[in-house]
Image: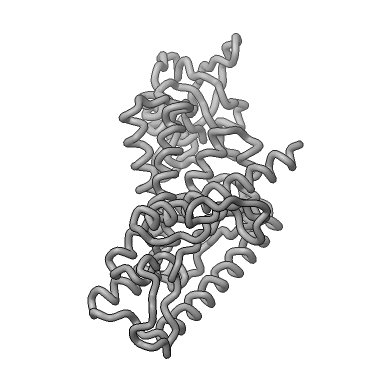
Amino acid sequence: MAFIVGAVGVIVAFGLVIFVHEFGHFIVAKKSGVKVERFSFGLGPELFGIQWGETRYCLACIPLGGEVRMTGETEPAEGVPEGAPIDPRGFFSRPWYARIPIVVAGPAMNYLLSFVLFSFIALAWGVPRATTEPVIGELADGFPAAAAGLKSGDRFLSINGAPVTEWKPMAEVIHKSPGRAMVLEVRRGDSTLTVRLTPRNEDGRGLIGVTPAVVQERLKPLAAFAKGAEQCWAWSRMTLTYLAERIARREKPELSGPVGIASVVARAARSGPADYLFLVALISVGIGLFNLFPIPMLDGGHLAFFLWEGVFGRPLGRRWAQAANMAGMAALLAIFVFATLGDIRRLRTPPPDAPSPASHP
């Protein structure tokens, strides 16, 4: 059953994210008057479908993503006589600036999906925040708290006889006591325990190796919408910053491919709806951002071609466009192989121990 839940979770996540992307292209093309010949949920051969107006709507055999097939989606080949009939509703019959919204609509829909999911999570389950109460969340191995037998969920009552009611004042006392033995009174369930320990001296600051407990704070609608937008921006910025730093240092970035993403999605599907929806939103941000990169064969590459046409008053030459598309395909294949090899390596390597919470007492 766990395998089935994970497999279904992977199919739904990938299918939803890519389908929403393609639906963005579809709806804007329709609204722009471009003729859409086929809109498919899934990829590959058609299982069944219906013809509605000028568009065939169908379900394909591979339930991952979708396809939008527009009339005149490729530029006419060289050698076509000037004045040859061109479908006025074809994609390339539109001026360059009218094609841009169709191309951008896919990534935009990915960001819209992420915004909706992030906001819904904040409304339904809340957002995590560290509690202000003196309750232990996690302990670091090898630090005095773990060695003294403290556990997650323990509540500090007093330090050296002085009552403790909030985390921050308690942390300040510990930070100011490096190498000094102290007596802690803690509550565990219905029991009260007395623990003796000595904070470790870390650069003149006392640490015992604990972090505060994390609670979920449900937000009101406006705050949840603001949080959804903030999450979209924060994850995009974090990704770009990470890539820029790696490139500046001439280091290989750690990328996740389909294998790694599928593994994480399957675990999230088994852990609960909040984790699963958050991961779907995160993947959608990644798909939207990646498609905006100016790499030929991606939406960002098409956007760059159209902007070239707008600036120079003519499209990029067909031979140059073909060469750029071949280079883009090679780059995408290289990224895919590199990410997949990294996924396999990470799956075969046990995860490292969690870092010690040096910013907490």
Image coords of residue 359 (percent x, y): 42, 40
Residue 272 in the image, given as x and y percentages of width and height: 60, 33
Q: What residue is drawn where x is 51% and y is 69%?
A: 252
Q: How is the image coloured?
A: one colour
* Percent position of residue 176, x then y: 37, 32
Q: Is residue 319 something one can see in this rendering?
A: no
Q: Give the residue displayed 35% in from the left and 48% down from the top.
A: 233
Left or right, residue 125 beside residue 314: right
Q: Is 310 left or right of 282, judged from the image as shown?
A: left
Which is more toward the observer, 60 or 103? 60
Residue occupying the point 42% across, 25% down: 217
The residue lying at 46 percent from left, 59 percent from top is: 36
- Foreground of the two, 157 or 89: 89
Q: Is residue 266 above or below residue 214?
A: below
Q: Taking the image as drawn, is residue 213 in sight?
A: yes
Residue in the foreground of this view, choosing between 282 and 202: 282
- For the C terminus, the quadrant is top left
Quadrant including the N terminus: top right
For the residue pair 42 and 119, the one nearer the viewer reads as 42
